[in-house]
Image (tube, rainbow, N blue to C red):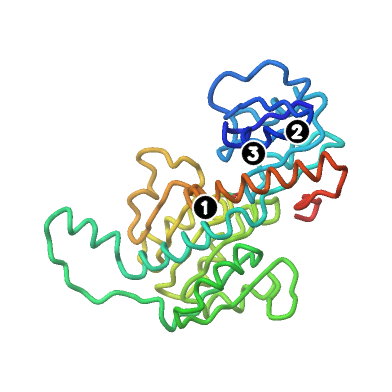
Amino acid sequence: MKIWVPSEEAAGVLADLPDVECVVHDGRGPVPDGADEVEVWIPPLIPVPDTPGLMASMKRLRLVQTVTAGVDPYQPYLPQGVTLCNARGVHDAGTAEWAVGAMIAALRDFPAFADAQRRGEWTYHHTGVLADARVLIVGYGSIGAALERRLAGFEVEIVRVARTAREGIHAMEDLDALLPEADVVVLLVPATPVTTGMVDAGFLARMKDGALLVNAARGTVVDTGALVAELVSGRLRAALDVTDPEPLPEGHPLWNAPGVFITPHVAGSTPASTRRALRLIRSQLLRYLAGEPLKNVITESY
Ligand code: GLV
């Protein structure tokens, strides 16, 4: 069975599996020959340029196992009969840690102090703080739960929102009422047709004056123009790991909007995520070879 894997490390964790031939394709170089023999594809962390074309060329493809939580580059183009599994859990630690760091950096003015340091200026001033804040987690899943665990020591109040309401978790329909009360709004929803542009001018307008928007989801969840308008007015602040467009082009108004802290989609790009991804790849392939049910199978309602 031929498998395309994104790295030598991934090939390494599958090396002892019987009848498995791993070919490394990291999405950067030329596409290797033999696409029509590939049965399992493990795409790289950063999506390859022509994902639909590549999947269409894999005539024997049965399984796409991503190393990302988000499957937006694959789900809309998945050929009939191919199973798609995501990397639920792999990025919980990295992304939750990024979100805590980004919140603290933004609230405590770390980016501005770093700029002042480079200028050799002692810019003493009071800052915001995480303590006593109400943190609204929009898209409460495994990353949200990991974030909540990490915030447990920060004396904040957590409010949870997910697609469907359950014990202790609000439904999306409650957002209108919850947004004006939140000091920090953390986006963790997957990118789907429903969440595209969800954070529009109306959503942002409901946020409290001075509130912080943290986006660790996808750039397309936020209407960039509407966010820039709120930032320019000085009413909201933002910490963004993802943007729309991405990469953010040179000269884009978001780069220099006031009160925004941007990182280049790095929340899950750490050795912690790599270790967890390698464990997942191996365990999923063992299940696949044994004909056992796979974990993290993506269904229509993802
Ligand atoms: C990263 O962006 C992921 O979807 O895991």
Depth order, front residue of 108/227: 108
Q: Is residue 266 above or below residue 1?
A: below
Q: Which residue is label 1 attached to?
A: 272
N-term-proximal mark, 3 vs 1:
3
Q: Is residue 173 above or below residue 248?
A: below
Task: Residue 175 in the image: state x and y as whole percent.
Answer: 63, 73
C-alpha gap between disc 2 and disc 1: 24 Å
* Residue 40 badge: 2
- How packed mark 2 is, by other alpha carbons closer than 10 Å (few <14, some 14-19, many 20 or more), is many
Depth order, front residue of 221/152: 152
- How packed mark 1 is, by other alpha carbons closer than 10 Å (few <14, some 14-19, many 20 or more), is some
Secondary structure of residue under mark 1:
helix
N-term-proximal mark, 2 vs 1:
2
> Mark 2 against mark 1, which lies toward the viewer?
1
Q: Is residue 34 above or below residue 43?
A: above
* Residue 13 badge: 3
Task: Residue 240 in the image: state x and y as whole percent.
Answer: 45, 56
Q: Amino acid at mark 2?
A: Val
* Residue 240 badge: none
Q: In the picture, residue 209 is in which quadrant?
A: bottom left
> Residue, x 44% and y 42% (percent of image)?
248
Q: Is residue 86 left or right of residue 39?
A: left
Q: Amino acid at mark 3?
A: Val
Q: Amino acid at mark 1?
A: Ala
> Residue, x 87% and y 37% (percent of image)?
81
The single residue placed furthest to the top in the displayed view is: 33
